Amino acid sequence: EISACLVGSEMCIETEYTLRISADGKEYSAAATIPRLDKKIESLYWDPVSESGDSTSVILSAQITDPPGYGNYVRYFTKRNGEDYLPPFNSVYDDQLIDGKTYLAEIERGMRRNMGITGKDTYFQRGDKITVKFCNIEKQAFDFWRTMEYNYASIGNPFSSPGKVLGNIQGGALGYFGGYAAQYISLNIPE
């Protein structure tokens, strides 16, 4: 059983949705609530990269105001020109250090994690049309992606601590069921 709603519809916000799956004699279930879209990007900025010899790369930054009260969790994706929306290497953040403050945050370019990554891959380029998908998420979605990204970053590192990916699927399956409240904001970088 999956409840559905229209994208952007107010009836979706703060409603609990449930997932129940029966397969091969096993039962799986999860519950999720789409949070309010309280934390938003107010504006996007770009600056040239200060590395010598690179005149085409730019750094994207966002001005964001965190509403007062702890417990605001976000995940973001970027879309560059005609590409898909992709998450950056670290895509989830909480408000433990910035509660109730207005701040400037660097927005790294999303990437396909199965491709080779270089330092320049986190930058955007002059002439790019960029759209940021900035999502308010529940703590359980934050915990899943935070632990998943930590484990992804530590694969093959003999000095990293082992970690457990935290999901919300009951019944023994790895993963999570959740919903995002999304804001879309775009910026064209001139040539």
Image (cartoon, grey):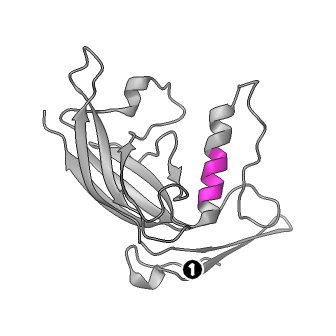
Query: Is residue 190 placed above or below 117 in the rendered structure?
Result: below
Left or right: 161 as drawn, with respect to 124: right
Q: Secondary structure at mark 1?
A: loop
**Magenta region: which residues?**
142-148
Residue 14 is situated, as x and y percent measured from the top left of the image, at 52, 81
In terms of image quadrants, where is residue 107?
top left
Identify the residue at horizontal 59%, vertical 58% (top origin): 142
Q: Is residue 187 above or below residue 122?
A: below
- Residue 176, image x and y in percent? 66, 61
Q: How far from the left and from the top, in percent, is residue 50?
A: 27, 24
For mark 1, what is the residue?
3
Q: Position of residue 179 (x, y in %)?
A: 53, 68
Q: Nearer the viewer, residue 183 or 27?
A: 183
8 sits to left or right of 125: right
Q: Quadrant of residue 190?
A: top left
Q: How many marks?
A: 1
Please name whichever residue, 152 or 69, is drawn nearer the observer in this view of the structure. 69
Q: Is residue 105 left or right of residue 4?
A: left
* Residue 20 in magenta stretch: no
